[in-house]
Image (spheres, rainbow, N blue to C red):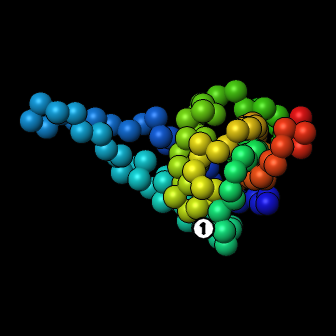
Amino acid sequence: MHFFMPMKIPTTTHQQKQVRVVKGKPIFYEPADLQQARADLTDHLAQFKPQEPLHGDIQLVVKWCFPLIEGSQDGEFKHTKPDLDNLMKLLQDCMNSLDFFDDDRYIVSLVTEKFWAKIPGIYIELQKIESIEEWPL
């Protein structure tokens, strides 16, 4: 399965969860902008939700395409924030909640890149890996 979601990529990431102390105990919560980013990603992903989740070992390929800014070129790597690992956590959580796979712990191969692009959005490729010989290395 593979698809492209043209969209404005949320730059708020899972890393931005907040904590407050209530009666001496830490309570973690998502601020409004993180809740909105989660909702936006989930809404875009929902149209590509598979009828059945993928089972077993999975390779996930994600290409983040950010809108061009002055001095950038289409297809050029993006070296600025947000960090890929933070972007991926929120995306994988959203995909998990929509049952793209049994659980994100089954993602055994992860390839992700971020670019500047004329058409902003997120390209996602998801495939089940039956054996190590099938790994597209």
Residue flagged by tag 1: what amino acid is it? Ala
Which quadrant of the rendered structure holds the C terminus? top right
Q: Residue at x 82, y 34 (%)?
A: 76
Q: Is residue 112 above or below residue 50?
A: above
Residue 94 spot, x, y in % from top left? 54, 54
Residue 35 in sight: yes
Mark 1 falls on what kind of element? helix
Q: How crowded is mark 1: few (under 14 residues within 10 Å), some or many (20 or more)?
A: some
Residue pointed to by mark 1: 46
Quarter where residue 55 is shown = bottom right
Q: Nearer the viewer, residue 62 or 36?
A: 62
Quarter where residue 117 is shown = top right
Q: Residue at x 38, y 38 (%)?
A: 17
Which quadrant of the rendered structure holds the N terminus? bottom right
- Residue farthest top in this picture: 79
Q: In this view, does 105 lie above or below 43?
A: above
